[in-house]
Amino acid sequence: MAFGARRVFPNDLRPRVAIGVDLPFSEPGVFTPNYQTRDAIKNNLINFLLTNPGERVENPTFGAGLREYIFKQINLDSFDFIKEDIQQKISKNFNNVNVEQVQIVETEDANTIRISITYSIPNTGINDELILDFS
């Protein structure tokens, strides 16, 4: 039995096989395919985080519902709640994604919030960061 074996996604080795669709869409009606598992997972996370529960047809529980926090009074306590909420929802819906760190940075002057999520996929060597800006 091999220890420390690295899992390789077969479609990553086939350069002409598309795995998913890139976000954001480039033009109306045009979908740009992506060809690497790393990109597909990142786009799936973006789609999940920006979707509210109930928006997806046939899957009413899909979505993190981050937009519900946009018009609420936000302070440091709510940052902790949002961090825990993001971690729980990702671990529940993406069992192959390990969330390593969630950071929330507020810029009062610009009325923006930046959410940075650092994650990894075990045994694949995939480590990435996802940044979402809300203004």
Image (spheres, helix red, strand yellow):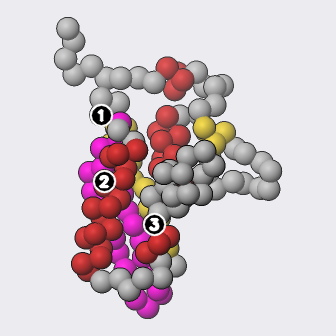
Q: CA distance from mark 1 to mark 2?
A: 18 Å
Using the rendered view, name the quadrant where residue 15 is placed.
Answer: top right
Q: Tell me which residue sits at (35%, 59%) in the image.
A: 86
Residue 122 marker:
1
Labels 2 & 3 near each other (Cβ < 8 A): no
Closest to the camera, between mark 1 and mark 2, is 2
Q: Classify mark 3: helix, strand or loop.
A: helix
* Residue hosting label 2: 88
Labels 1 & 3 near each other (Cβ < 8 A): no
Report the magenta residues as a range. Answer: 96-117
Q: Tell me which residue sits at (39%, 42%) in the image.
A: 94
* Residue hosting label 3: 66
Q: Position of residue 43 (x, y in %)?
A: 53, 48
Residue 63 appears anywhere in the view: yes
| Quadrant showing the N terminus | top left
Q: Tell me which residue sits at (40%, 44%) in the image.
A: 93
Q: Position of residue 129 (x, y in %)?
A: 39, 53
Q: Camera-side residue: 73 or 102? A: 73
For the residue marked with disc 2, what is the amino acid? Gln
Q: Is residue 13 magenta?
A: no
Using the rendered view, name the quadrant where residue 83 is placed.
Answer: bottom left
